[in-house]
Image: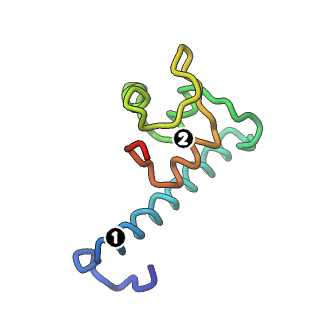
Amino acid sequence: MSDLSKPLYSLTVGEYIDLSKEAFTREAERIINSYQNKNGTSISNSDIIFINEVKELTGYKNSTIYSKVCRFEIPVISKRRPLTFSRKDIINWLKDGKPSVID
């Protein structure tokens, strides 16, 4: 979005969607960078992660993650205990703006 002086109420639907995606992407990058700095590890170490790491990446509570898994709103590898996720899929999901519907 090039015109930052434009008020929010005057945006078209397409401009608002682009602005939202850009904001979600920036927030996802901030979360990922803070996660890397806090743990001192690179994201590419292991692709398999569990619910505690998903909580740190997304900022969701356990109950929210479980409900999103049940509604197929978050990418998951295994729904059995323990829940297993792909780090790459979660990061891509965050960068795409946390879509909540199955495509």
Towards the viewer: 37 or 60: 60
Q: At 40% across and 86% down in the image, what residue appears? A: 3
Q: Is residue 36 shown above or below 52?
A: below
From the image, which quarter does the N terminus lie in?
bottom left
Q: Disc 1 to disc 2, how far (Cα)?
A: 25 Å
Left or right of 88, for residue 1: left
Please count the marks in the image. 2
Q: Nearer the viewer, mark 1 or mark 2?
A: 1
Q: At 36% across and 75% down in the image, what residue appears? A: 15
Q: At 50% across and 54% down in the image, what residue appears? A: 96
Which image quadrant is residue 10 in?
bottom left
Give the x, y percent position of residue 99.
42, 48
Give the x, y percent position of residue 74.
47, 37
Q: Is residue 10 shown above or below 60?
A: below
Which image quadrant is residue 101 in?
top left
Identify the amino acid type marked 2: Leu
Disc 2 residue crowd, few under 14, some 14–19, many 20+, Cα 10 Å: many
Identify the amino acid type marked 1: Tyr
> What number is the disc on residue 57?
2
Q: Earlier in the sequence, mark 1 or mark 2?
A: 1
Towards the viewer: 23 or 56: 23
Give the x, y percent position of residue 5.
35, 85
Q: Which residue is mark 1?
A: 16
Q: At 58% across and 28% down in the image, what residue appears? A: 77
Give the x, y percent position of residue 36.
67, 45
